[in-house]
Image (cartoon, rainbow, N blue to C red):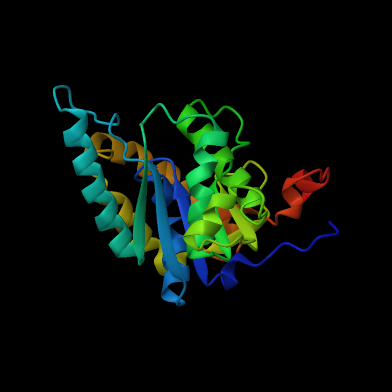
Amino acid sequence: MYIPIPDLRQAQNVLVVSPHPDDAEIAAGGTIALLAEKGAKITYAMVTDGAKGGLEPGVSEAQVAAIRRTEQKQAGNILGVADIVWLGFQDTEVPQPEVVREPLISLIREIRPDFVISLDPWLPYEAHPDHRRASMGVVEACLFAGLPMIQPEDLEHGLAPWQVTGRALALSPSPNTFIGIDSTWDKKIEALKCHKSQFPSQIWDTFYPLILAKSREYGSKANASTGEAFKVLTTTHLHVMVDTWEA
């Protein structure tokens, strides 16, 4: 590959974009905690509040949203997240990427991250439209945030164009970066357990062995017992670059 892959481990100012509460912890909780411990500033952008993710009949969307916001704040505190921004899109009804990217472009210009972490929009067999649309909105926002003629009204609010150094796509079918998370594994699991509305005991007992097995697989590629994997790319990789799949 002709274009070097940026080093996620050196990130200093990170924007993590998550379709729902708990997605960030599942996909990248150990890495987020590791970066925070090294002094990086971590900002979460929650595309939805997960209001339709309740598992108990009779509980209103407003109640579920309040529960999940509290759970996400607790999980973020464990991992070292500095701030959580709620974008306000409707759970299960996230619009097309060209709509999602608009507030993300402004947010990128506001916080000026060197890295953006999100899910990989090219994950095959992903059935949840929120994941597909939100994640594609993220990569489109990263592509356009550095162009002054895109959303020029941002300049009126003091938001100058900003070029992100790298995007780290989690849950990727083609990862190129493996990060050992042995030192933050316990934080990842503690943060996941904050999402009690999503992981009652009967679900957790099935879910935990799966995430542990995958973490061990990724850890073996990072000379560690547990790990997380990402497809890390630059902006150049995201436009007319036929070699990106192999990067």
Q: Is residue 163 left or right of residue 156?
A: right
| Residue at figure coordinates x 25%, y 43% from the top left | 68
* Residue at the extreme right: 2
* Residue at the extreme left: 58
| Residue at figure coordinates x 35%, y 66% from the top left | 82
* 100 w.r.t. 167: above or below: above
Can I make out residue 70 in this image? Answer: yes
* Residue at the extreme front: 156
* Residue at the extreme top: 57
Image coordinates of residue 45 in percent, x first then y, are 41, 51
Q: Quadrant of residue 186?
A: bottom left
Q: Quadrant of residue 94?
A: top left
| Residue at figure coordinates x 84%, y 56% from the top left | 1
Image coordinates of residue 128 in percent, x first then y, are 47, 28
Q: Is residue 51 left or right of residue 225?
A: left
Image coordinates of residue 15 in percent, x first then y, are 48, 58
Q: Nearer the viewer, residue 66 or 127?
A: 66
